[in-house]
Image (spheres, rainbow, N blue to C red):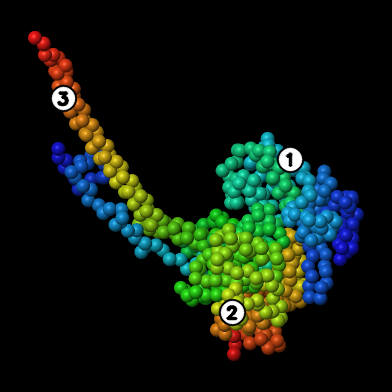
Amino acid sequence: MFLILRRGFATNSSLLCSSEKIVAPPPSKMKINKSKVPKIREKDLEEKYITGWGPGGQAVNKTLNAVYLRHVPSGVWIKCHESRSLDRNRKTARKMLIEKLDLKINGEDSVQRQEERLASHKKNLKREKTRLKYEERRKEKENQSETDQENSSNKEDNLEYIPEDN
Amino acid sequence: MALHLSRAVRRVAHFSGISGSRCFAAVASFSVNNNLLKTLFYNQRHENSDTVFFYTTKRNFSVLTNKKNVPRKYCRGFSSPATGIDTNSNVQCVLEAVHKILEDAEIPEAETCSRYLVSQVLGSTKQFAYKEHLQQKLDNAQVEELNRLVACRLARMPVQYLAGNWDFREITLQVRPPVFIPRPETEQLVDIVLDHLPSKTSQRLLEVGPGTGNICLSLLHENPDIQVTALERSKMAADLTKENAKHLNLDQRLEVIEIKVEANTTLPPNSDQTPQPVQYDALVSNPPYVLRKDLISLAPEIYVYEDLRALDGGAEGLDVILNILRLALKYVKPDGLIFLEVDPCHPHILPLHLEKQALPFKIDKVLKDFQDKERFLILSRSS
């Protein structure tokens, strides 16, 4: 059985034969290209906490720790209140802002999309591997049942043959 | 002293119309310089309830109630106000009810607080965890716990003490009264220290006043090459620091010594009994730095529930800071740095005091906090 693999053919695993290999690097060799990730400057950022901190420091005890961070040139903004630590939220907000900016500016080349593609590629390869494994098992079973049938039909002959005692 | 405090209780009972034996006033006391004992008390009366909520230190509780061997709990003797929260309302309604109760009582941060409390009874420390359970109904235990928390909050107990734990940078610390609750500004102090320590070399740090252990434990957690010796005058705080260190598996690199830092403090000899004083590579502290005049205008959450000895810095807020510098002269290496969190006026008034007291230190850097206030000092030896 031969299958002509057309160039640019989508990796639709159901149409691939085991003798044809996918010409793509293995996931372990695929690197995420982070060179295009935008860098942000602190002075371009506007950070807001809730007002009313008063003198601050030891004299104040506030639980407000939500961070609202805006990148002024692009208008992208993030709100972060994942942790009860203000410092942690500020750092997480900056990471989230860079990811959001990366997605907005670089689109398909952004780190997020690259990671999604890598994950989907890994998933496809795994699916293909599983499919091939079951194919082989199915073939083995077929062969096995064929041999079984032959054996059993031989047995029946034996059964039928009853040497007569003379 | 016993007479003084019981007079305070009687006065509160008189004004609130509640019989003295059932009225417990929340009392915070601190002694300053010349052993002046100042008593502040707080009383919150709820409708439909006879007993007021209180918190006090174990010692004061014994004095107030004439009871001995009191177990140390931070919330005792209250009856819930009528909150209207029951097992028939769903989380959405409960949240709105709590918010209304707190707002009507003019409790600050009512919205944030109600979210934290409802999420807490649902078993989470995250503020918005309640959103996943909006249509759920609370069970009896949860309703009882929530009523208790609301009663405590109405008596102005800080949310952090109600939760029992709070996040500080990457770690979560157990917190309990009266140990000083870590403030968000101090999180930046840890960054400053980490930035100035040489990397990949083992360093010995000295910390004065760890409190819950937020600074030393963050440093230990984020830098595996350092060891810290922490000096703490309050047994309650020292115990809590040790407890937090154990929880975070950092107790191997932390030594906590219960000692008050004064003008002529001498540290006990090393654990290996070497007689020479250990030379530390750096000193870090968030010392009590609030000026006496600002101490009066503190919120009840602070002056009732937190140990004011962790805040009171004397007339100019510099008393403890100057003692720390005297300690640094003896125990920190000549090229070692001193990292302090201070009041915004200190960068301007400290140099004069250093000169007057003949302390050979100079301010290398003044750094601002997230509110753009001059909050952090880095000092080094001047000669």
Q: Please state the total of marks drawn on the protein image.
A: 3
The front one of A32 and B324 is B324
User: Residue at the location (76% across, 69% down)?
Assistant: B295
The residue positioned farthest toward the top in the image shown:
A166
- Are there few (<14), some (14-19), or many (20+) residues within 10 Å of tag 2? few
Reading the image, the residue beneath label 1 is B84
- Which circle, 2 or 1, is nearer the viewer? 2
Name the element at disc 3.
helix
Choose the circle earlier in sequence order: 2 or 1.
1
Q: Chain of mark 1?
A: B
Cα separation, mark 3 vs mark 1, equals: 81 Å
Specify the amino acid type for callout 3: Glu
* Residue B376 position within the rendered picture, expressed as x and y whole percent measured from the top left: 61, 74
* Residue B341 position within the rendered picture, expressed as x and y whole percent measured from the top left: 63, 73
Q: Chain of mark 2?
A: B
* Residue B262 position within the rendered picture, expressed as x and y whole percent measured from the top left: 71, 78
Specify the amino acid type for callout 1: Gly
Above or below for B115 versus A71: above
Left or right: where A31 falls relative to B377? left
Reading the image, the residue beneath label 2 is B274
- Are there few (<14), some (14-19), or many (20+) residues within 10 Å of tag 3? few
Reading the image, the residue beneath label 3 is A150
- Which circle, 3 or 1, is nearer the viewer? 3
Left or right: where B82 falls relative to B198? right
Name the element at disc 2.
loop
The front one of B367 and A45 is B367
Q: Are marks 2 and 1 in contact (CB under 8 Å)?
A: no
User: Residue at the location (69% across, 72% down)?
Assistant: B259
The residue positioned farthest toward the bottom in the image shown:
B383
Q: Quadrant of the N terminus of chain B?
A: bottom right
Q: Chain of mark 3?
A: A
User: Residue at the location (47% across, 64% down)?
Assistant: A73
